[in-house]
Image: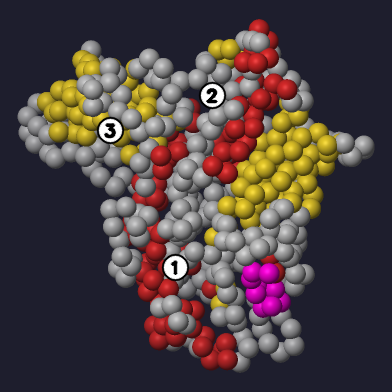
């Protein structure tokens, strides 16, 4: 399990009902007490908040007009609590260093109604879902999938995107029987217009290509660009795995946030019960040209690999033989074991490039965005981004990634965990990643084991509220706001406390 603490102390921020990893800055010292200071801001607008009370152990301070507070506390670990009218209360843990100043900046989330009896609320004041009989929660599993613009040299990742959906009949619960759930991409109906993947995907004659014998516009799992979603492994939702999307619309527009239309119909009658739209993100902004040149980027990569590793990739290509990176470098994203004694792909990439790419204080300029999408794509766009979290706060920097991978971390299967920072109340299911976890501590036990975390919070890197408006379509459709799905009246029709986690 990947755990990283980039600085000497840990600070925790309550954001949207769960905690986000951050770091307290401290400077050492020997005095009995230290100073804690920081700025409290509205997490949505970024405006400083005056009159906010920050307290700990009987001591408290109130923010000034600039949102700044200062509080003297003994050295050691402390839990700070903040309260402000119109905002959700929050608690944070921080290590105070005696004789030093510790910075504890704080974003607050505007409060929602905690207990609302919507049966007594006028229809004009109710949320949009109140007029619906069926509602859909839908999401992409990762927040961003990666592909290539050109497959004529080698293959890192094929076109591959995965969508999930859950259907609820309001007042009755999740529905899986008697319905058909279809997906389609009105703006991306022909991926073959913008990728040469299917020219090289299969093996034929004496020339070896990538080994997936699939028809044009069909993904490597046999999933087409449009069709019916299948019941998922837990039996509580629907999934379409390996959709072969590109970041290009049919008219050539570059759009890494293509939108899928999800339609739920009555299987027997064909009547439409509900529709929604959800982002299926994919980007080819891998930025290899930053180091390998813009003229013959992929050829340069093959040449460098041959030079450094004694391979014959350039000659193989000239003879019609193309290779997947995962033939040699194990890649859990594709489920390929690679070759014994060869570094897995994540370790090979992070380990080799850690001293060769430009880095900066901002991981998006360029740092992580040297290879991960990217300054145009802006993959990091969710609520954690809003409150100042960086890629490295969860994943570590290039050196940290390399260290953990060398120590045995299994990439894609062992990821940063919400529970490492957000407390047990908001942790994933034991041994299960966030993207596969379901609610387990609901006020109504019938909800447990049913509702996916990503159904209410959206996928990693795109947690509600996302900086990309298209990501926020579903909460807007159901609640009339951009927040996570916090309003129990989305699915319930009776009086409910507005909390999902006990």
Residue with the mark numbered 2? 501
Name the one closer to the observer, 449 or 120.
Answer: 120
Could you tell me residue 260's position as x and y percent? 68, 49
Mark 2 burial class by Cα count in 10 Å: few <14, some 14-19, many 20+ = some
Residue lying at 31% horizontally and 24% vertically, measured from the top left: 49
Magenta extent:
193-202
Residue 201 part of the magenta segment: yes
Query: From the viewer's perspective, is residue 253 above or below residue 473?
Result: below
Name the one closer to the observer, 456 or 2.
Answer: 456
* CA distance separating discs 1 and 2: 41 Å
Query: Nearer the viewer's eye, disc 3 or disc 2?
Result: 3
Could you tell me residue 81's position as x and y percent? 32, 20
Q: Quadrant of residue 242?
A: bottom right
Name the one closer to the observer, 169 or 289.
Answer: 289
Residue with the mark numbered 1? 287
Residue with the mark numbered 3? 105
Q: Would residue 1 be visible to someone looking at this image?
A: no
């Amino acid at each position: 399990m990947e755990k990283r603490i980039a600085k000497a102390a840990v600070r925790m921020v309550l954001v949207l009902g769960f905690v986000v990893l951050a770091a307290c800055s401290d400077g050492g010292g020997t005095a009995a007490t230290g100073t804690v200071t920081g700025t409290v801001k509205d997490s949505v607008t970024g405006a400083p908040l005056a009159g906010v009370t920050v307290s700990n152990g009987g001591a408290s301070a109130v923010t000034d007009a600039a949102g700044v507070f200062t509080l003297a506390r003994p050295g050691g670990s402390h839990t700070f609590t903040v309260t402000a009218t119109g905002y959700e209360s929050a608690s944070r843990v921080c290590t105070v260093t005696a004789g030093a100043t510790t910075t504890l900046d704080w974003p607050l989330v505007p409060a929602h109604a905690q207990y609302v009896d919507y049966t007594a609320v006028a229809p004009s004041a109710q949320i949009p879902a109140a007029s619906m009989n069926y509602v859909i929660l839908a999401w992409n599993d990762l927040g961003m999938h990666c592909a290539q613009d050109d497959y004529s040299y080698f293959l890192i990742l094929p076109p591959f995107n995965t969508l999930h959906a859950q259907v609820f009949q309001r007042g009755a619960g999740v529905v899986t029987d008697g319905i058909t759930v279809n997906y389609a991409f009105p703006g991306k109906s022909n991926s073959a217009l913008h990728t040469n993947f299917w020219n090289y995907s299969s093996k034929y004659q004496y020339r070896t290509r990538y080994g997936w014998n699939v028809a044009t516009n069909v993904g490597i799992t046999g999933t087409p660009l449009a069709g019916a979603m299948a019941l998922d492994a837990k039996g509580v939702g629907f999934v379409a795995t390996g959709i072969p999307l590109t970041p290009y619309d049919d008219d050539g527009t570059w759009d890494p946030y293509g939108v899928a239309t999800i339609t739920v119909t009555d299987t027997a009658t064909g009547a439409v019960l509900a529709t929604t739209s959800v982002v299926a993100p994919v980007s080819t902004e891998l930025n290899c040209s930053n180091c390998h040149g813009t003229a013959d980027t992929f050829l340069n990569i093959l040449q460098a690999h041959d030079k450094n590793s004694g391979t014959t990739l350039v000659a193989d290509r000239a003879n019609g033989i193309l290779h997947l990176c995962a033939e040699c470098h194990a890649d859990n994203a594709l489920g390929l074991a690679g070759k014994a004694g060869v570094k897995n792909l994540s370790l090979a990439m992070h380990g080799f490039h850690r001293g060769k790419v430009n880095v900066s204080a901002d991981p998006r300029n360029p740092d992580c965005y040297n290879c991960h999408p990217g300054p145009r794509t802006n993959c990091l766009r969710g609520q954690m981004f809003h409150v100042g979290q960086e890629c490295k706060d969860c994943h570590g920097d290039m050196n940290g990634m390399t260290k953990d991978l060398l120590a045995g971390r299994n990439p894609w299967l062992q990821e940063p965990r919400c529970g490492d920072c957000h407390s047990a109340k908001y942790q994933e299911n034991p041994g299960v990643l966030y993207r596969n976890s379901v609610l387990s501590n609901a006020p109504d036990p019938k909800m447990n084991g049913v509702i996916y975390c990503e159904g209410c919070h959206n996928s990693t890197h795109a947690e509600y509220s996302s900086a990309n408006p298209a990501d926020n379509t579903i909460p807007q459709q159901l609640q009339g706001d951009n927040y996570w799905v916090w309003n129990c009246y989305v699915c319930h029709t009776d009086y409910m406390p507005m909390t999902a986690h006990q």
